[in-house]
Image: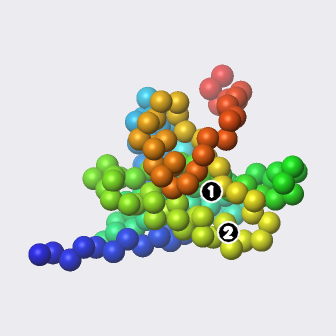
Amino acid sequence: MGMEQELWIRPGTAADAVVIAAYNRALALETEGRDLDPERIGPGVLAVLTDPAKGRYLVAEKGGRVVGQLMLTFEWSDWRNGMFWWIQSVYVASEERGSGVFKALYRQVESEARATPGVCGIRLYMEHGNAPARAAYVRLGMQPAGYEVFERDFTRG
């Protein structure tokens, strides 16, 4: 019997930029049917990887290959006098889905957030109707916040 490869959760680095951008493109296509412009997403990923004020990525690596990712951004809550960590750009390679990759990434975020003074919670948003994602988030102890997200996206006209 082959040995199970260990999953390693680590900070994303500039060396991961190409795979993170590719996963972000796959994510947009799968969840929203959007084909992200490589000329925009590549620099967008690098901007986060090189400027911690914008956010940071965590990646899940198995056998020397990145098999999952998420991005964290930060939102100050005046109501709570604390910082929310927002989970965004969640993607797990299709062949690794259901194997605990997202759970490991989430648990790492939760552990770091609880250990960081001033962090008041973790949030994320998802596409309406994404039942598998909703079920995964609830299993991890998250609850619907009761908000809807509105936007005016200047990059889309």
Please indicate, yes or no, whether residue 64 appears anywhere in the rendered image.
no
Q: Secondary structure at mark 2?
A: helix
Q: What amino acid is found at the position of numbered circle 1 in the picture?
A: Leu
Q: Can you give x and y, in whole percent of width and height, for residue 34 in the image?
A: 47, 30
Q: In screen coordinates, is 48 left or right of 152?
A: left
Q: Answer left or right for 84 relative to 7.
A: right
Could you tell whether 73 is left or right of 36 in the image? Answer: right
Residue situated in front as seen by the camera: 15 or 3: 3
Mark 2, Cα crowd under 10 Å, few <14 / some 14-19 / many 20+, is few
What residue did someone put label 2 on? 114
Q: Identify which residue is drawn at 75% across, 59% down.
A: 120
Horizontal relation, residue 18 to residue 2: left or right = right
Question: Residue visible at 69% across and 34% down?
Answer: 147
Please tell me whether residue 9 is drawn above or below residue 151 in the rendered image. below
Q: Crowdedness of circle 1 by 10 Å Cα count: few (<14), some, many (20+)?
A: many
User: Is label 1 in a helix, a strand or a loop?
Assistant: strand
Residue occupying the far top of the picture: 157
Please identify the quarter of the rendering in which residue 116 is found: bottom right
143 or 5, which is in the foreground? 143
- Give the residue drawn at x 62%, y 26%: 156
Across and down, in percent, residue 2 comes to 15, 75
Q: Looking at the picture, does residue 23 appear above or below residue 58?
A: above
Q: Residue furthest left?
A: 1
Residue type, label 2: Arg
Q: Which residue is mark 1?
A: 72
* Mark closer to the observer (1, 2): 2
As drawn, the label of residue 49 is none
Instruction: From the viewer's side, name the closer residue of 127 and 37.
Output: 127
Height in image: 87 above or below 8? above
Q: Quadrant of the C terminus?
A: top right
